[in-house]
Amino acid sequence: MRPVLRRLDEIAAVLRERDDVIALLGLGSCGAQPARLDDHSDLDFYVIVADGAGWRYLDRTDWLEEPAPVTYLFTHQRGGRRALYADGVLVEYRVLTVAELSRTPFSGARTVWRRPGTPADLVTSGAPVPRPPFDTEDYHLNDALVSLYIGLHRELRGERLAAARLIQHRAVDAVIALLRLGGGEPPYRDAFEPARRIERAYPSDVLPLAAMVPGYAGNVAAARFTFAWLARRYPVPPGIGEALRELIRSVDVR
């Protein structure tokens, strides 16, 4: 058994002895898709507690430290912590009541342990996973084009980091969405982070990431390449297409 799964079982053994804990849910690679696990996986889980008991599992870490010493801990969101065990297992967890869980968007959860009589549908989120306003080819294509256009203007203004986030991040996320729509759901897609496992889903001749994401000093080259990639595959609207071509030419002259 991999160390992260063994640690999850050890935490479950501690929590099942506590009357105010209702369930323990594994998420991510420790959730419903264990085939994703490898030597670099961390441990994500939700501790589901009775009403009013959350503070005991957020303010106190005795339950967390019982399986092994914890060398690092910090609050990364409301009701959530990240911690590092001395043996290198990194964990990210949230402490939630059943009502809070029903309002939390998540996917791919697995019941590690639940108290007898607890509803079996805890692993099903009652809140929708965030999606773009429109999950269509038209939306993602135009989102990519406008991101390239705004990004190049920020590059010209000297805002290179802001430009990189548009040209090499947002536009590339839109490209990934276009590939997904055109070829079906890639295996083990992360609904919250499109970049996860993307290299396994699309070979470099399909998704040439080295050219689309060359780094901080490569915004112009990335924009030029990504625009050409899009123009070869999709009907680029003439207005934004001509504006982008002219902008790329003006950047090249400079």
Image (tube, rainbow, N blue to C red):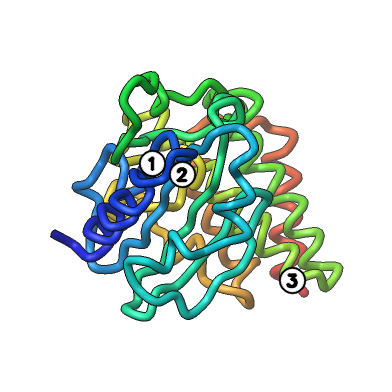
Residue type highlighted by circle 3: Arg
Query: Distance of mark 3 from mark 1, alpha carbons?
Result: 44 Å
Question: SS class of the residue under badge 3?
Answer: helix
**Disc 2 to disc 1: CB gap under 8 Å:** yes
Quadrant in which the N terminus appears: bottom left
Residue 212, image x, y percentages? 50, 60
Residue 77, image x, y percentages? 65, 54
Residue 241, image x, y percentages? 67, 40
Residue type highlighted by circle 2: Tyr
Query: Distance of mark 3 from mark 2, alpha carbons?
Result: 38 Å
Q: Nearer the viewer, mark 3 or mark 1?
A: 1
Residue 160 numbered tag: 3
Residue 24 numbered tag: 1
**Residue pointed to by mark 2:** 46
Answer whether residue 202 is visible to the viewer in this image. Answer: no
**Disc 3 to disc 2: CB gap under 8 Å:** no
* Residue at 54% from the left image edge and 23% from the top image edge: 136
